[in-house]
Image (cartoon, rainbow, N blue to C red):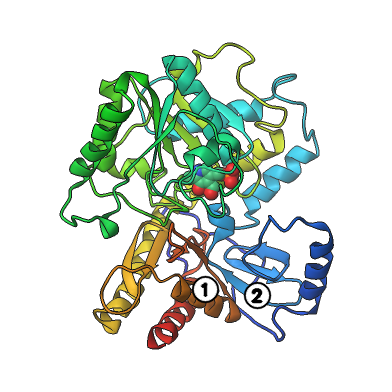
Amino acid sequence: MTTYATTPGVTAPSFRLEQKRRITGDFPGPRSTELAARRAAVVAKGVASGVPVYVADADGGIIHDVDGNSFIDLGAGIAVTSVGASDPAVVGAVKDQVEHFTHTCFMVTPYEGYIAVAEQLAELTPGDFEKRTVLFNSGAEAVENAVKVARLATGRNAVVAFDHAYHGRTNLTMALTAKSMPYKTNFGPFAPEIYRVPMSYPFREENPAITGAEAAQRAITMIEKQIGSDSVAAIIIEPVQGEGGFIVPADGFLPALAAWAKANGVVFIADEVQSGFCRTGEWFAVNHEGVVPDIITMAKGIAGGMPLSAITGRADLLDAVHAGGLGGTYGGNPVACAAALGAIRTMKEQDLAGRARHIEAQVTERLGALQADLGDGSIIGELRGRGAMLAIEFVEQGGGRTPNADATKAIAAHCLREGVIILTCGTYGNVVRLLPPLVITDELLADGLDVLEQAIRTVNAG
Ligand SMILES: Cc1ncc(COP(=O)(O)O)c(C=O)c1O
């Protein structure tokens, strides 16, 4: 049924649901429409959904809605279901765990699964030093705790974040996040002692020739002049920015920042909540440039869809915290830990980092050919990304860099009508991002790209 590329020693995934797109009729159908009405009566408007259909089942790269439509999933629940939405290793581990115990609270009566996840994270994260891990529930919670640890361990207050950053929706992580609408508007006051410095955003640099090292120096000068390096507890950065637009900094930017942090006793926190766990073609995005963070924050892909997050970092930093200073009722829930162990096993057995690189090759070939065919001055401003974290930044026609959010919305809507779920992002709302489950079959991905190509051609033609 599938031409999933296989290499000796690498296991191919197996699927419960047929990996095929099918739109049967009305869209959204009657059952989704009925659920939307029930939802409107009881669910707060602030929780918005990008897709107006309700899910009945999901597996691999396919989502079935309650009206019998099958969608190609190019979003993976925002980079979560990298192993697919119902990976047998995750499902089996979860079933086995829930039959024994669902919760005891690791802070009360501990269990092995938590330790086993911490052992995996010590092995998988970069850095040849002693490490410690703490588990939480969400990405924002991991970020909050990484900052807590950095402040306590350094005795300093200031935290440096970047333009276009996204770190979550809690009070501290809103403060770290750059974009106001919809994440911050009217939710203040925000946590103090957060400072923002310029990112390396090659497509939008005033001087396109600026190198990664020069862009890092621009940020470092601002830190030294406006905060003072002695006051800085941590720099936090997404090695490939997620919500901000899948921005890949210029080569040399991350290593220069990490080196400066090391020389100045500043904790370098890599927020790999979106980019981690094979998504970019490596276990972690920092691996592309050999950067070794002091602390890494992780969530999303870590547990095949179960809520789990983690911070892993230098033992001397994490062990500086007094007993009882870190934790939470549900952090490292045993079912979520079992799911993480299943997901990590799948990532290893199926070489999903290699699979992400395979997806990158397929997508960039297709979209690169499309960009060349549309020629200069089309709405495609830039194709970028790493592994299966890929993006198209759309601009107004004519060769400039004016963001084109309308085209982006129209393309996403076209894809959805044809049965392909794609997500948008970006400070200017003008980026389509591709985050397929890493187990997606070649045929399904090709079908999704056919639809995306058609959508781009239609919108480009006006
Ligand atoms: C880089 C990054 N950090 C933190 C978060 C917040 O994670 P969560 O939504 O699980 O709180 C996200 C979510 O998109 C993210 O992409």
- 362 relative to 415 in the view: left or right: left
Q: Amino acid at mark 2?
A: Ser
Q: How many marks?
A: 2
Residue at horizontal 45 percent and vertical 76 percent from the top = 407
Q: Earlier in the sequence, mark 1 or mark 2?
A: 2
Q: Which mark is residue 412?
A: 1
Q: Nearer the viewer, residue 280 or 122?
A: 280
- 76 relative to 63 in the view: left or right: left
Q: Quadrant of ligand 1?
A: top right
Residue 269 locus on image (x, y percent):
41, 32
Mark 1 lies on a secondary structure that is helix
Residue 43 locus on image (x, y percent):
78, 57
Q: Nearer the viewer, residue 189 or 368?
A: 189
Mark 1 or 2: in front is 1
Q: Is residue 201 above or below residue 448?
A: above
Residue 326 locus on image (x, y percent):
61, 21
Q: Is residue 296 above or below residue 82?
A: above
Kindly indicate the quadrant of the structure image that contains residue 384.
bottom left
Q: Is residue 50 above or below residue 231?
A: below
Q: In this view of the protein, can residue 222 be seen by the observer? A: yes
Q: Amino acid at mark 1?
A: Ala
Q: Which mark is residue 156?
A: none
Q: Quadrant of the C terminus?
A: bottom left
Using a 10 Å C-alpha cutoff, classify the residue at mark 1 as few (fewer than 14 neighbours), some (14 to 19) or many (20 or more): many
Q: Which mark is residue 70?
A: 2
Residue 51 locus on image (x, y percent):
64, 68
Using a 10 Å C-alpha cutoff, classify the residue at mark 2 as few (fewer than 14 neighbours), some (14 to 19) or many (20 or more): many
Q: Nearer the viewer, residue 401 or 167?
A: 401
Mark 1 and mark 2: Cα distance apart in space = 17 Å
Kindly indicate the quadrant of the structure image that contains residue 296.
top left
Mark 2 lies on a secondary structure that is strand
Q: Is mark 1 within 8 Å of ligand 1?
A: no
